[in-house]
Image (tube, helix red, strand yellow):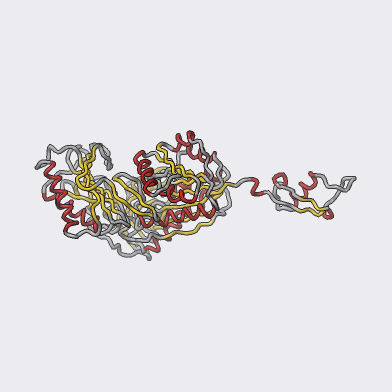
Amino acid sequence: MKKGQSYEGYVESVAFPAKGIVVVEGEENKAVVKNVLPGQRIQFRVTKKRKGKAEGVLETVMEKSEDEVDAVCPHFGICGGCNYQNLPYEKQLELKARQVEKLLNEVYISKGREIEYSFEGIKKSPQQYGYRNKMEFSFGDEYKDGPLSLGLHKRGGFYDIVPVTECKIVDHDYRLILQTVLQFFGERNIPYFHRVKLSGYLRHLLVRKAAKTGQILVALVTSSDAAGLPCDEKALLDEFLKQLLSLEQEKKLEGTFAGILHTVNDSVADVVKADRNEILYGQDYFFEELMGLKFKISQFSFFQTNSLGAEVLYDTARNYILESAGGMADQIVFDLYSGTGTIAQMMAPVCKKVIGVEIVEEAVEAAKKNAELNGLHNCEFIAGDVLKVIDDISEKPDFIILDPPRDGIHPKALQKILDYGVSHIVYISCKPTSLARDLDAFLERGYKMEKACCVDMFPATANVETVCLLSKLHEAKHHVNVTVDMDEMDITSAESKATYEEIKKYVAEHNDGMKASSLNIAQVKA
C-alpha cells in the first residue's frame, strides 16, 4: 500500500478506540482505518505508511455490515461526537466488551502468563440517549467564511463547526439552549474568536444539567476583545440573559436555571477556562444527587458526564471493594485521583477514614464542601500530584482505589502505590489501553487481577469505563498443610524417623512439582 492511494478492503475487526483493522486483497499487511464497523467493505485512502504499517481515512462504505442500522441523529458521520450510532445498542455493548477483554488478555499472553481472571462482561447505561450532563459547544463557522455556527467540531476537522441542533446524546434543554444562543448572536452578527487571527469575541458555550435535580448551569465563554462588537458589551449580555431566562419563564425548558455566567478566556488554546468570571444570574454552581449523596458542582468541577451511568459504575466498584475487603470499619482507604471526592464519600460510611488525593485544587475544595454537605467527617482531601503527595502522608492504607485520568498512572507514582503492598486495589479506568499498560506493572509486582467489568458510560461513542479488582499474592496464602503417613516413606535413618529434608523431598514429589521449601509442613503422622 502506498501513501496517497485509495484501496478497497474488508473490516475484519475494530480495536479500541474505533480503530478498524482492514484486510486488502493482495496486500500482506493490514491497514488501520477509524470510524468503521466490523463486516463493512470500504474504500479508504492511505494517509500514513511507516514500517510496513498503513493508516487511512474512510472515503466511502461500499457494503454495509450485516449489523448496521440507520443512525437516529441527522448529524451522525458529520460531527465527531459519536462513532457507533449506526450499530444497535446491544451490538455496541458486545463490541466494547470484546475490545476490553482482548486488551486485558493480551497483557497475560505477551508475558506467557495464564489467563485466570473472571471477565464479567459489560453493564449498559440506564439511558442510551440524552444521557450527558455536560457539553462544551464551540463557536465558529460551518465552512470557511460561512455564517456563525455553534456546536461540535466536524469529524476529522479542526476549524469547521457542525451546528448539532438535533444532537441525541443530550436532552431537549441542551438543544433548545443551543438553538436559542446561536440564533441570538447570529442575528446580531457577533464575531466568533478566530484561532488563527486571534481576534473575535464568541468562544464556547458550556451547558451542565443535573439528571436528578434538573438544575442547569450555563456559561458563555468569550474573549475580552469587545472593541469589535457592533454594540455595547454590557447591553449585549443583558439582552442575552433576558433571552435565556425567557425559555424558563415561558416554560419551554424541562429543567430550571441555577446560574448563568459570563466567562472571559484569552488563552490561545482552544479550551474552556476562565481568566475572569461574572455571574449574570443566580449562582455559579448547581446540585446533583448520586447514590443518596448530594454534590455541589461548579463550572469546572470534574463529575462523570453520565449521572445515571455513574451510579452503575460506582455501585460496581463499591461491590468489588466490599466483597473483597469484608468488614472495613477499622480500615484506612486511599482514593487516589479522587476528583470531587465522589468515590471517597461513597466509602466513608463503611470505613475508618478515607484520604483522597487530587491534583486539581478546585476539585479538592469541592470535595471538602461536598463531604461537609453530606455530613461525612472521616474524609480528608489533599491537593497535589499523587507522585509527590503520598510520600508526605503519615497514614498507611489498608485498601486503595485508583481512578486516574485517561493516560493512566505515572510509572513512578505507580511504583510508590505498589510499595504499600495492600491486599486489594480497585482500579477504575476510562481508557482500557492505559489500564492494560498499568496492569502489566501490577502483575510484575505480585498482584493478580481477580475480575473485571465494563460499564458503558458513553453510548454511541467509542469510550467505555472498566473496573477491575486486583489482589496481592502473598506467599503465606499459598502455604499448604500436609499430612504425611510415615508408612509410605522410605525411612533411612537409624531411629526410623524422617528428617526434614526427606519430608521436603516427599512433599515436592507429591504436590505437582510445587517447591517444598515454600510449604508449611504442619503435621507428621507416625
Relative to 204, say whether 20 is above or below: below
Q: Which residue is found at the position 25% from the left and 48% from the top?
A: 206
Image position, residue 436 (x, y; %)? 48, 47
Relative to residue 405, is residue 168 depicted above or below? below
Number of numbered discs visible in the structure rendering = 0
Inspect this view and state whether residue 501 appears: yes
Determine the residue located farthest toward the right in the rendered image: 494
Q: Is residue 109 visible?
A: no
Residue 386 vs residue 508, the one in the foreground: 386
Q: Is residue 231 left or right of residue 120?
A: left
Front in this rendered view, residue 60 or 138: 138
- Give the camera-side residue of 348 and 364: 348
Q: x and y percent of residue 81 in the render? A: 30, 53
Q: Position of residue 288 (x, y in %)?
A: 33, 53
Q: Is residue 205 left or right of residue 475?
A: left
**What residue is at 42 percent from the left and 37 percent from the top?**
385
In this view of the protein, which residue sits in the foreground, 257 or 220?
257
> Picture coordinates of residue 388 (x, y %)?
45, 34
